[in-house]
Structures are given as C-alpha cells and as structure tokens.
Amino acid sequence: MSTRSAELLMTVGLLLLSLGLMWTVLADDLHIGWVEGRGPGAGVWPFWLSAGMALASLWTLVRWFRGATPESRNKSPYIDSQSFGLVLISFVALTVMLLLVHVVGTYIATALFLGFYMRFIGKHSWRTTASTCIGMVILIYFLFEWQLTKYLPKGTKMFEDGFLWIDNFRWQYLM
Amino acid sequence: MKYLKTLMASALAVVVSAPVALAEWQPRKPVEFIIMAGTGGGADQIARLLQGLIEQKGLSSRPFIPINKPGGSGAEALRYMQDKAGDDHTVMMTLNSFYTTPIIQEDLGVDVTQFTPIGLMAMDTFLLWVHTDREDITDLDSYVAAVKGAGLDWKVGGTGSGQEDSVLTAMMEAAFDYEVTYIPFPGGGTVAKNLIGKQIDSTVNNPSEQLAFYEAGDSKPLVQFTGERMAAFPDVPTARELGVDIEYYMQRSVNGPPGMSAEAVEFYTNLFQTLFDSAEWQDFCVSDGLTCDGMLNGADLASFHASQVEAHKKLIAQVGAGAITGE
Amino acid sequence: MLDIATLLGAGLLQAFEPLNLMMIFIGCLAGLFIGAMPGLGSVNGVAILLPVTFLVPPTAAIIFLAALYYGAMYGGAVSSITLGIPGASTAVATVFDGRPMAQQGKADQALTAAAVASFIGGTISVVLFTLFAPPLAVFALKFGPQEEFALMVLAFATFIGLGGDDIPKTIFSILLGLVMAAVGFDIISGQPRLIFFDFVELQRGIGFLVLAIGIYGIGEMLWTLENSKGEVKIHAVRSTWKSFKKNLSHIREYLPTTALGSALGFFVGTLPAAGATPASLMSYGLAKTFAKDPDSFGKGNVSGVAAPEAANNAASTGSMLPMITLGIPGSPTTAILLGGMIIWGLRPGPLLFTDRPDFVWGLIGSMYVANFVTVALNLALIPLFVRVLAMPFTILTPIIFILCFVGVFATTDRMFDVWLMLLLGLGGYLMRKLNYPVAPAVLAIVLGPLAERSLRQSLISSRGDVMTFFERPISLTCMLLALALMIYPIWLGMRRRRAGSASGTE
C-alpha cells in the first residue's frame, strides 16, 4: 500500500470514527443542546467536538484530492518494506504475550516474549537470553510483587496455584 | 518495602502487639481490597487506614491491597465483584452508591443483596452547612426563607449527580417545596472549599469534610440529618426535632462477592471485628464524626442492606431518578 | 519576617534529626526508582507506601512521603529521557525534547538539565511557600469554577504552536484527545457517555497514562523500529567527571526558562484541582513561544527539558499549600497525603499552622533538605541511568514493551487498560506515520476533563450567562492573557514575514 492510499484510507476511517462517535452520543440520548439556565448539556462536549473531528477529516480529504499534503503525493510504500517484517513481528509477539498473560500469567509470558525476541530477532546467545529473562522476571517480582505489593495477573487457576506454591517460600522464610 | 518497614520499626523500637488468635482459614494470596470510589475520598481513607492497621497488628498472613475502582459511581466496582463470585480473596469497602447505582443503572445486572455481608464499620452523617458570614441565616427557618427568596440563584454544591448529597438535596427540595441550582464538584473537600470561598451558598457535607473550617469559624451547621444529636454537635438540632422527616446516613461497610465460602466469611468477620474494637478505629470515629456503635455483621447486615435497598428505591421513585441524575 | 526565620530554623533543625533525615534519604531514593518506572508515578508510590508510615510519628511520616513525592517527580524525568516513555503524567512534556536529546547522544546532558531544573524549581517554590503560604491560601479560595476554566483556556493558549505544520491534522488530534477525555461517567449529569460495546470498564474513562504509554511506549517504539530498519542507534553515552562539569556549564542556556517555569509551576500548583501536569505543559508551551529559536523545540532543545521539569517540581511543592492550609488536595498525590494526615490524627485546615507549628515547619524544613538530597542522588545516579541506552535494541525493545504492560497494570489494576494501551499505541503509530501530531491529543486528554467540568459548573452557577467569565477579575485577567498568547505567535509571524519581504530575501 502506498502512503497516498494509506492517507485516504486513514482519513476516511477517521471520518467514519467521528461520525460513529456522534451517533453514539445521539443513541445514548444525551442532551446535545443548550439547556436553558444550565449551560451545555451532557452530550454537547462529545457531540460537537466529534463534529469538529469530522470536519477536520473532511478538510484533510479535500487537501488529499488537491494533493496539498506531502503524503498524498508520496507513492512510496506506507510501511517501509525492509522493516515491515520487523514491525509486524514485534507487534504480533507483543499481542501474543498479552494473550498469554491471561493463560499462563505475567511471569511465564514475559519470559517467553523476551526470550523469543532476544534469541530469534536479536540472535543473542542462549546464555545471554536465559540470564536476561531470569533477571527480568526476578526484577518484576521483586519490585512490583514484593516491594510495591501489587498482585500481577497470574493466569488460569493451575498456573496461579503454581505461582502461589513458589510465592509461599517468601512468606515462610523471608519475611 | 518490607526491609524499609523493618528499618522503621527497629528505628523506633515499636512494639507490635502480639497477633490475635488466628482463625483456621487464612488467605493464601494477597487480598484485593476494592474501594468503590477514587483515591483521597472518605471511603479510600478508611480503607487505607484499615489496611495499615491490619499490617500493623499482623492480623492477616497476606497483605490487603487497596484497589480503587471509581468508574461510574461504583458501577465498575460492583460489576467486578459480581464477576468475582465465589472468590475468597476479594472484599470491598462500600458507600451508599452500593444501593443507588444498581437502581439507577438497571442494566448493570448486579443485585447487591446477593453479596456476602462482612461488617458495617461506621455510619457517616450529613449536616447542612452555610458560610459563617451569612448572619441572616441562623436556623432552618431563616435558611428556607433565604433560599426561597433567592430562588434558582441559590447554589448548592455537591459531589455529583447521583451521589448521596444530591439525593439529600432532592429530598430537601421536596420537603420544603423550593428549587435550587445544584453544582457538582469532584469530591467533598472541593465542595467545602467552594463554600468557604463563597462560590456556593450551602452544602450538605459530611462532618469530616467541614470540621477544619467549622473549628476555624468559617462555616456553621444548621441542621443534622440524624436520629439523635451527635456528641460532636450538641447544639445543632436534628431535622426530626424541627418537624422535618428527613434522616439520612452514609453506610461504610465491608462486603465480599456473592458466594464466598463460610470459612472465609468467618475469618474476615473476625478480622474486621478486631479492627472495629481497636482503639485506633474508635479514635478515628470520634475525630471524624462517624457513628460507630457496634459492628453489624452476617444476617443482621444482610437485612440492613435489604432494608436500605428498599428505602433507596422508594426515595428514588419519590424524588425521581431525574432529580438525582440532573437531567 | 523574624517569626518566619525562627520557625523555619526550628523546622530545619527538626529535619536534621537522625530519624527524619533518614526518612528523607530513603524517601527520595525510593521515589526516584518508583518514578523512573514507566507508568508508576508519585501517586502510586505515595498510595502504596502510606500504610508503612503508621509506624512512625506523623512528622517523620509526612516527611517520608513528601520526600517520596519529590523523588518520584525527579524520577519521572529519567524514564522520559532514557526510555522515551513518560514516567508519570507530570513528565510528559519532558519527553518532547528529552527523547530527541537521548537519541542524539546527549542523554547525560538532558538528565543533568532535568535534575538541576528540578532543584531550582523545588527550591524557588519552597522559598515562596515559606514566605507567602497564608496569603496564597486566601487567594486560592477566590478560585471558583470560572477562574479554573479561564486558567484552562490560558493553558490551551500556551500550546498554540505546539502542533505540527498540518493544521487540519493538528486540530483533529486535539479534538480526539478532548473527546477521549469525555468517555466515562459525566459527573455533572451522572450519565455514562461514549461507553462502546457496553464495556463497564469504560465507565472509568480512558486514563491519561493508558494513552500516553500507548502512544509513547508502544507507538513510538514501533516507529523507531521501522525507521531504523532494525539498526536502532541510540548513541551510548560515556559519563565522566569532565562531561559532567561540561553539562553543568550549560545551565546558563536554560536558566531564564527554568526561573519562569518555577514561578509558574508554583503558582499553578497552589490552585486546587490544577496540579503539576498542567503546570509542566504550560511551562513548556511558554518556553517555546518566547524562545529565540522556537523551531528547535521538539528536536532536542535543552530548555525544553528544563522548563517542564522546573515547573512540575515547583508545582509539587505548590500543591502542598492548599492541602495544608485548606485541606484541599491540589493534585491526586496530595489527596492521598491528605488522607494520611487525617489518619495520623492531624486535621489540615486553616488552624494547622497555629495548632501544630512543629508539624508544618518540620515539613517545610524537610522540603529544603529533600531538594538537596534528591539533586545529589540524581546527579550521582546519572551514569547508571545512561547505561540503559547502551543496551542493544533487541534487548531494550522487549524490555520497554514489558515495562509498559506491567506499568499500566500496576497503575490501574486491570488487563482491560493494558489492551486499550496496545490498541491506542497501534493507532498512534499508524497516525503518526501520516503526519498526525500525537502530542496535542495527549495534552488534550489531561486538560479536557478539567476544562469541560469547570465550563459547565460555571454556566450552571451563572444560570447560562457566558459573561460570567469576563465579570470576575481573576478570570478576566486569565482570559486576556490567553488572548494575548494566542495573538503573539501570529503577530511574530507577520513581523517576520514583513521583515523578510522588506529585505527582499524571499
């Protein structure tokens, strides 16, 4: 996709988003007018500002047809083909990590993500990869779970029980 | 900051009282202490005080972690608790939006009478306040006269449409047959400041929010909406004494999600009973103008909730949900 | 005057008591590290460590928490500069120039500037605090919704010129931020607004941090990955004693903006409801508007780091003022401090100064000391912080992603916001590639709720009369200042154009 078509697509998308926002306000039955003696109603702010967003998108659309924005004259690919793979793989890996958090919990998910990234994208040695992963997990545990008493997501019951079994040592021996 | 705590403790040689006899069931992981309001408000202060006392007294094998879920007048917190049904490691600090929010937001799908009642820690009270400079207002009658004279120019500050003080304001409008302009502010502290700064004319605040200004002589209470006069305000008449049938409290209770196991309920009930009986809590009640006569728990608290839900339903039907939501 | 000197002396002596001094030191250090974590700021630090303080006397406890507050304010800049992610809302403006400086290999200079500016800001405001606390409290009381709204207009006026060169896209970005701010529960009408797909989670609204971390943590990181084609080159910095001295010598460049930012920050901080974030943004906007070279801002101008840092530290001191004198928190952090004071049995309010001078002046004394301790700690730790930048990108990138996730979760306690962050980050990345400026949206989401609420409160109280903003002296002054600020860049541009055409160069 060229930058030129990307801008058209994005502008149309944002125009639809703005209209969708306006529609949501109306669908929620919020007051979009001036309430006598009370000033603007609850819907005024989101409705009219969304209308402004729609106008700004229209303006950009006009500029696109006239070729006024540099992007509308730019025929080169929207995302650089050389680095497209890297951006995509980073984003997908991140998404997979967050999905995994729901299943296996924070610690295993982050370790897998970090390990994958370092080993297969960074081509670091297994030794560096493993030590960084372990270090990171310990750091998160120590800082967030221990010092700041935050209960990070632990995933499903099975993984949570596994974590609690390990966590128990802290309460029994270290406190 | 465990080592920090040790450091602090040893630096002061604080003698921590011996842990109370522990019940059989103990939390296996940190307990989520949900607060159905934002940081810094009354419910938040209480929850954080209780959390501190739990740690200080070593009442729980795992810490309580206060988590604020203020979204939608507590709607977010209520729904979260509902989704946590059967969980033994979550308890919630509530206020009156515990009753009002499910009534106003019908599609929330939450029935608070299904929740597990643990303990009623305190009842907070409401008083009607005006600035001390309003010398023409000395009692309820002169207040009503002043409001009627000003009409819609009379500005009442509050903490938001649908909040407790807006309910009370609507009740007063109905009782005295006048209409005022209600201006919502974020938090009771801000309301108090705006009264002292004369941005608003009157407010129904909790005592804790006005106490500092009252002591400094900047504001004065006219009426208290309690059954009997509070010890902190012996000279202020109750609405009932003046023949006005308004009595309203803010409950501050701890509840668990629906379907909590009996052992866990016993543990939490004992824990909060210990806290309730502690000198620290009773001192806090006195200094903050809270009523803490005895802790309701179990079936007593459940029937208390049930009657409150009914009372609020009636109240909202009477003043109209519109009067509360402001549209 | 003499009174103040005596009381302050006693306060300083109190701050130097071994227990209190230790509290200051531990507080500053803990705050520095908490603030340096993306997402975690002073609010979390103070909230989490509040129960710890039940173990020590109130004076030591508040000193500890206040030191933590300062430390976190300094620490926020560290993550803004080294990782490019604002550590807290107060440090957003620091990213604008701190990040480019780090990319140019000047991270140590940026960190030094941030530390020095924070110190100056903190010190100036604590002096102002000492001298003018009671009269300023009276002034803060005069601040109603009308004044608050006028202040927001003023804040928006300082951002003119902060956007990109594409006008419709800049407008879109601002409006998008303002609309996102409206998501959630409307406190005025008590109605839920813009709750998409009936997510009950959205009733809390879209948190500023979720957007900022999404855009700066995820979006910018993807952008960097693409532009560098995987060869991310962030110049590693070697910090030596010599470079340290050289960095300090740059002070003169940013001293004027720092001084201005400090005074502004203190003033805005003292106003209830405003707090440090608007202060730092306004300070950045002003520094840019009145700079000789406004175009260099956003590309690594050291004044762009110093101005917001001076202001946010000054504001953090300033926001203690309404808390102590009126019992009104000026920022979310002071709201928790306030809760702490009540729990310790102290009732903040007009009487605290007279009833408990030992407490108030002990706190003020500790503010002076805490400023010295934090600046020293911070400068000493700079070599450690810049080391982060020496990591290869294939390690740094995943670690930043992980910290974004953990940071957002730790702040809001729900995975919903983590997913929202990812979504907003992706959107921000795709838009940024098409020359949509992202900073205006981030600014708008901070100021949006304040602006809307105060506007509607004012109009309800004036019963719909718009003239209310121009009838009150303070509000009128702010409005006029805002107008002047909006006209100034246009006037400047016209003058330049005229000068350009006169000399016939173009």
Image (spheres, coloured by chain):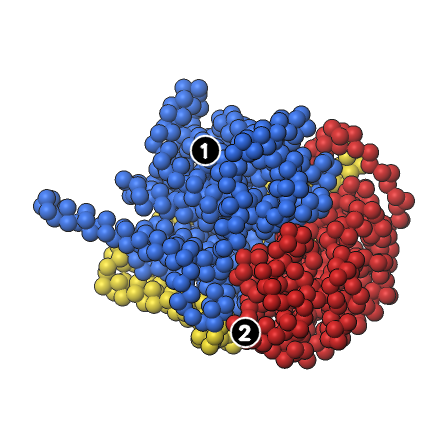
Where residue B45 appears, as percent x and y from the top left, is 69, 51
| Placement of C330 over or under B239, stated as above or below | above
Q: Nearer the viewer, residue B304 or C237?
A: B304
Crowding at dot 1, Cα within 10 Å, few <14 / some 14-19 / many 20+, comes out as many
| Placement of C325 over or under C130, stated as above or below | below
Residue drawn at 37 percent across, 66 percent down: A52
| Residue C256 placement, left or right of B111 | left
Residue occupied by mark 2: B150
Which colour represents chain C?
blue
Gap in Å between the C-alphas at discs 2 and 1? Answer: 50 Å
> Which quarter of the rendered picture does the N terminus of chain B lie within?
top right
Residue B279, can we see it? Answer: yes
Which colour represents chain A?
yellow
The residue positioned farthest toward the top in the image shown? C242
Residue drawn at 82 percent across, 36 percent down: B16
Where residue C390 appears, as percent x and y from the top left, is 46, 30
Colour red belongs to chain: B
Q: Chain of mark 2?
A: B
